[in-house]
Amino acid sequence: MSQKFRIFATADIGEALDQLRKDGYEVEVYPTPDAPPKALIVEKVRGGIDGLICTLRDKIDEEVFAAGQGTLKVVAQYAVGFDNINRADANRYKVPFTNTPDVLTEATAEYAFFIMGDLARKLWSAERLTRENRWGSWHPSLPFLGDEVTGKTIAIIGAGRIGQAMIKKCAGFDMNIFCCNTLRKGQAFLDAIQEMMDLRYARGISTEKNWIKYATLEEALPQADFVSIHVPLLRPEESASPTYHLFNEKTLRLMKPTAYLINTSRGPVVDENALAKALKERWIAGAGLDVYSKEPLSADSPLRDPEIEDRCRLLPHHASAARTTRLSPDPDKGMAGRCVQGLRDVLEGNYGGDVAKMPFVVNKEAFR
Ligand code: GLV
Ligand code: GLV
């Protein structure tokens, strides 16, 4: 490479950065595990870096893009979700930003599935009982009973990449599936899943005939035993169909009192005060959360109320946290590899330098 590019990474994404260095990039990494202060990111960008590697906890907006005017060529987000990046600001300053789709799809979906099982079968409470020596003798209805997942009905809110991966796992558990999507463009996928369900029934692998179909939220919520959220966070000013507080008092009240809510998408999709109330007053049976309106979850969050701890699982934004998914430098396997590939595509002018053709650039609309 004739030109030497300068990069600042707000977090250490491992081996993938070594490859950049080997190829002549100058890479500086924020050394501690906390998020760098915004002022530091702005300072680094103002210092003339060519590329910024950031992640979901870093707010990237007008202030950052203005500081990089004329020098900042790419923002490479280490995450699939990018609600921390102000798209309109990126477009105004004509800075492409990339994300890391696909490589975390299965890891995130399986984690959502495991939270669902933990929640419904009360694994956390059960292990605690054992560890605290409160395990009495084996008894049909003690210490408590959970609910089966197998054969139940689930509503998948947002059947995109991760939602579809969740559907595959649910189909394997003989579940019936509602898909709640604003855009119903995955019909071929639904047809294929239905065909597989029919075959499983025909060959005696499943004892009941299962189904998958599109439904509105209003149709699905009153019938679902589980509800799993897989939508991006879209604020009202960003979209005609926003997802901000999609789960609120009104929609939570549509759910069955025996139903469970799982959220591995973004915290603000759920109104947490409404959810805490729903759990406390038992409008729903439980919730399993991996994401929050404020992360880390604040010490005074109503979700921490000990009164609801038996039915509220709280995980630390952890769904993609599997070794290969997070750190593989292979762009087809790991977020680290894919993040660096997105950065390289822009800086090295891959795809004939046509930003709109680069697969990991999100804001292609600014470059057409
Ligand atoms: C994680 O939340 C991601 O968006 O990758
Ligand atoms: C449970 O352990 C059983 O044997 O039914």
Image (cartoon, grey):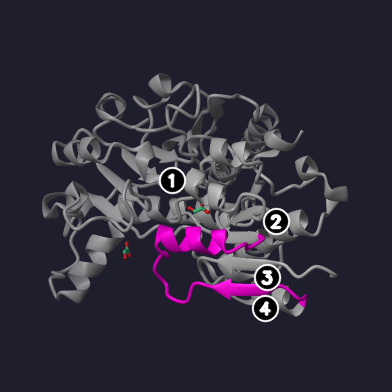
Q: Marks 1 and 3, how far apart in space?
A: 37 Å
Hey, what amino acid is under mark 1? Answer: Thr
In the figure, 283 relative to 58: above or below?
Answer: above
In the rendered structure, which disc, 3 or 2, sits on the residue that comes first in sequence?
3
The CA span between labels 2 and 4 is 16 Å
Percent position of residue 216, x then y: 46, 21
CA gap, disc 3 and disc 2: 12 Å
In the image, is the residue at mark 3 within 8 Å of ligand 1 by its beta carbon?
Answer: no
Kindly identify which residue carries mark 2: 342
Rendered image: mark on residue 329: 3
Vertical placement of 143 versus 168: above or below?
below
Q: Secondary structure at mark 3?
A: loop
Q: Which labelled disc corresponds to residue 150?
A: 1
Distance Cα–Cα, label 4 vs label 1: 45 Å
Q: Which residue is mark 4?
A: 18
> In 3D space, how far apart are the residues under numbered discs 1 and 2 (Cα atoms)?
40 Å
Determine the residue positioned at 13% across, 55% down. 306
Q: Is residue 43 located in the magenta-colored stretch of the structure?
A: yes
- Between disc 4 and disc 1, the foreground one is 4
Which one is earlier in the sequence, the residue at label 4 or at label 3?
Answer: 4
On the rendered structure, is 198 left or right of 354? left
Query: Which span of residues is magenta-colored?
Result: 23-50
